[in-house]
Image (cartoon, grey):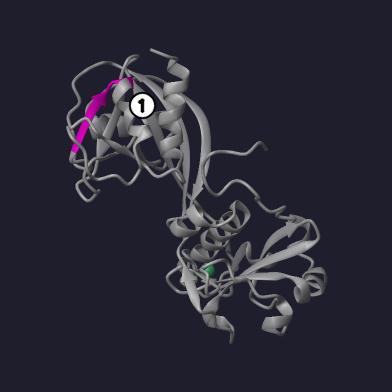
Amino acid sequence: MASVPFAFLDGALDRADHLRDDAGALTALWPQARVVLLDDEGRAFADAGKALLAPTGTQLGGGPGVATFLGLRDAEAWFAQPAHSVAFDAPERADLRAAATHWPAFDATVFAQARAVLHWHARHRYCGACGGEVAFVRGGWLGRCGQCGSEHYPRTDQAIIVAVSDGERLLLGRQKSWPPRRWSVLAGFVEPGESLEQTVVREVFEESSVRVRSCRYLASQPWPFPGSLMLGFIADAEPSTPAAGDELEDVRWFDAATIRAGLARPWNATQGESEDDIALSSPISISRWLVEQWLELRGPG
Ligand SMILES: [Zn+2]
């Protein structure tokens, strides 16, 4: 896959599903394997320079045990494990947002995978059917209830994120908790029994009262804060006056010149001359990329 301009895709491991059931192979890979250690807040162990510190299996001792097998980079195996389960310490911790900005793409992507799967483990220790204790097998990718035998698979929370346009302008909203001047495209979780296209129409209407006429899928991004998958769309909508619903403080149409100027400003800018001096989401997110895509598809002018 070509390099993509947002985080958590480049450098993805070969997940090597065939090895998940092969305890002998995982044990043989363990001594040279690299192990991503996450604390209870989902932060990764880091060295004094705040770079990823992933010890080898030999440094941790023992065998893969309860470690989750993330996959292979060439012949090198990568595992993830909660830090509280090992006798190993590190001088620093790194959170995933900082890692996405400052770490090499591979390191940030492997951290994102580790964080997503270990979060699933942490929140699914008991069976949803009978309340029995769940044991994670298949290298950490299958949960099996010790009481009723139910099998539980890793889950992600799907959310749509959408650049809505009336042909000329882009619809952006802002939440009350955001820094001044920050605006973003709209997003919302997919509900059970709903198609992605239906979610786009419903969420945009709930958040802005604007009616989407059509939409088209562009790309997706794993977003393990803590367990989402962002599905990026572009949509055409009626040019009606937006009205913020419960989730947003404000929602407005912005013209291309304002959007272009917003992209040229630092994403975390909080100062400006006029109301139209906006700042857009961080470059790690598909949110900003969708804004750029809208401008590009719209063409110059
Ligand atoms: Zn059960």
Q: Is mark 1 within 8 Å of ligand 1?
A: no
Q: From the image, tell me which residue sits under label 1.
A: 260
Residue 217 or 178: which is nearer the viewer?
Answer: 178
Residue 125 coordinates in the image, percent (x, y):
49, 71
Magenta range: 250-256
Where residue 175 sits, quadrant-wise, is top left
Q: Is residue 255 magenta?
A: yes
Where residue 196 sits, quadrant-wise, is top left
| Residue found 62% across the figure and 46% down from its top | 10
Residue 198 or 219: which is nearer the viewer?
Answer: 219
| Residue found 25% across the figure and 24% down from its top | 253
**Residue 153 is at least partly visible in this image:** no
Determine whether, in the image, residue 13 is placed left or right of residue 159: right
Quadrant containing the N terminus is: top right
| Residue found 29% across the figure and 44% down from its top | 269
Quadrant containing the C terminus is: top left
Amino acid of disc 1: Arg
Q: Secondary structure at mark 1?
A: helix
Determine whether, in the image, residue 265 is placed left or right of residue 271: right
Give the overall secondary structure of the magenta segment: strand
Residue 129 coordinates in the image, percent (x, y):
48, 64
Against 272, residue 26 (above or below) is below
Q: How many marks?
A: 1
Where residue 151 sits, quadrant-wise, is bottom right
**Residue 167 is at least partly visible in this image:** yes
Residue 27 coordinates in the image, percent (x, y):
78, 75
Residue 140 coordinates in the image, percent (x, y):
63, 66
Residue 161 or 214: which is nearer the viewer?
Answer: 161
Against 8, residue 144 (above or below) is below
Q: Is residue 257 magenta?
A: no
